[in-house]
Amino acid sequence: MFILIGALTSFNLLIVLYEEPPLRSLFDQEYEDYRRTVRRW
């Protein structure tokens, strides 16, 4: 069970800290609008 929680937490941090910043800089306001209207999970 702890392995699953650790894996899910790691996956979430990967998305938030590694993938989202380049998307923000690449798409700027479009990405911010998208984030406001679509839930992350």
Image: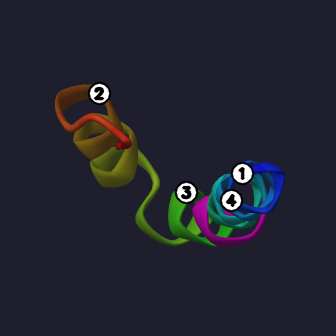
Q: Residue at x 72, y 49 (%)?
A: 5
Ranked by sequence position, the earlier of labels 3 and 1 is 1
Q: Closer to the camera: disc 3 or disc 4?
A: 4
Pick whichever, 39 or 26, lies toward us.
Answer: 39
Gap in angstroms between the C-alphas marked 2 and 1: 32 Å
* Element class at badge 3: helix
* Element class at badge 4: helix
Gap in angstroms between the C-alphas marked 3 and 1: 34 Å
Label 4: which residue?
A: 4
Q: Amino acid at mark 3?
A: Arg
Q: Residue at x 52, y 67 (%)?
A: 23
Gap in angstroms between the C-alphas marked 2 and 3: 13 Å
Label 1: which residue?
A: 1
> Disc 1, disc 4: CB below 8 Å?
yes
Q: Amino acid at mark 2?
A: Arg
With 17 as the anchor, is 16 left or right in this view? left
The picture quadrant where one finds residue 4 is bottom right
Label 3: which residue?
A: 24
Mark 4 crowd level (few <14, some 14–19, many ≥20, 10 Å Cα): few
